[in-house]
Image (tube, rainbow, N blue to C red):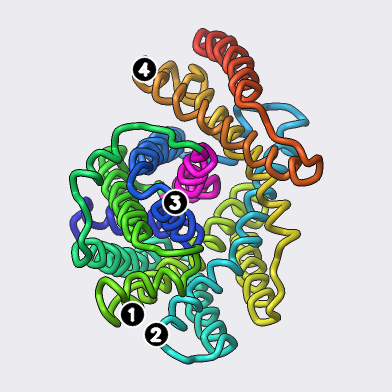
Amino acid sequence: MPKKISSIILWSLIAAAFIGPGTITTASAAGASYQYDLMWALAFAVFACIVLQEASAKLSIQTSLELPALLGKLYPGKFSKSLIIAIGGSVILGCLAYEAGNMLGAISGIQLFTSFSTPWILTIITIGVAALLALGKPAIIGNFLSVIVALMGITFLYLVFQANHPWPLIAKGFTPSVPSGSLWMILGLVGTTVVPYNLFLGSGISKGQSIREMRIGLYISVILGGLISMAILINGSLLQGSFSFVNLAASLDAQLGSYGSLFLGLGLFAAGFSSAITAPFAAAIISRGIWTKNPANSFHLTWIIVLGGGFIFGISGLKPIPLIILAQATNGLILPLIAISLWLLVNHAQINNGKVASVRLNLSFLIVTSIAILLGMNQLWNLLAKWLDETIKPYLLIGVTGILLVFIFLKIKKIRLSR
């Protein structure tokens, strides 16, 4: 297979990972609440995803080290191992917490146009995911997921072009604006696209590629994923009433006839099933990079635990709420921490043999890291606000972000001069 095509198929893992039931929910809700006004937020999310994913993959290609090992070089000393385990463990916990949601999302899609019972569908999904993960080969998984991503793309784009949408208003939505009450929705759209575990996943699958091959595969897959997310937002603008998959299906049926439910169900199934594969796969790659004494055992044991946890929560009917809350809190810290770490890594003269980031790349990281910090503080504050019954002031978020950026600039200045 030509290397360019095989790279695109391999990197479809990233698109499959961030387009899950959570993305469909968030993007659809954004369309229902604000019509097309937040299209620009998804465009920015794609930009941020490319900046961070490319940095993670490029560092791994240049140094032949995966992200956990690179973090070990960035934070040396006795504290390093504990920090890496804390970061990796938190991301793995997030994968476990959301795996049940991925599976239940796939089931919701099937049940929009069939009457199959949840236990049967869940069992079949679990067996299918386990069979793919048992192979443990990114290329095989990528081949399968490229078909799933293509199915999602065709499904949601078909729905867009079949309905009557005002294209001039859609184009206007790419002009940045913040409608009243939309700030947290904007952060949510970015957060559901820039996923922490994808950075570890991208680092793990980039081995054996050239930087050029990686860029071709990464850019095309992430942009395709962004287009699918935008199509979901546009379809969400048709929603009447409160958000649910059933209500969204009814709105699409009103526009397209019974085919609306069918195509939404297929797209939702594809999103849930693909994320049900990538979540345990990414967790396994992270585990392999942290516990290096027996990486093969770490890899297989981790995906079995994550997949098994999702199956148990799904079959029991229990909602993994405590785990999801904990995952939200930890990932609120993890995303900005990883963004800051990648920014430092691309400027670290010793790790990169004197090749440090350009002004353009540093500017990109400044924008993306600032948003990541705001995202993290927003997630954590939302959890605290429920307990304290308080609301956060925007100037506090901006002030804390500014202080952190000053410290980052001072650190970058120091490590760029190290040889």
Name the N-terminal-most of marks 2 and 3.
3
Label 1–label 2 contact, CB within 8 A: yes
Dot 4 amino acid type: Ser
Q: Of circles 3 and 1, which is in front? A: 3
Rounded to the nearest angstrom, the CA distance separating label 4 from label 3 is 39 Å
Q: How many marks?
A: 4
In the displayed structure, would residue 404 be above or below residue 384? Answer: above
Label 3–label 1 contact, CB within 8 A: no
Residue span colored magenta? 181-205
Q: Of circles 4 and 3, which is in front? A: 3
Residue assigned mark 4: 358
Rounded to the nearest angstrom, the CA distance separating label 2 from label 3 is 26 Å
Describe residue 2's horizontal placement relative to residue 202 as left or right: left
Dot 2 amino acid type: Phe
Residue assigned mark 2: 113
Name the N-terminal-most of marks 1 and 2.
2
| Image mark for residue 33 | 3
Q: Measured from the top left, where is residue 183 in percent x and y? A: 51, 37
Q: Quadrant of residue 44?
A: top left
Rounded to the nearest angstrom, the CA distance separating label 1 from label 2 is 6 Å
**How would you rate the neighbour count of disc 4 (Cα within 10 Å): few for under 14, some for 14-19, many for 20 or more?**
few
Dot 1 amino acid type: Leu
Look at the image and tell me whether residue 151 can be seen.
yes
Dot 3 amino acid type: Ser
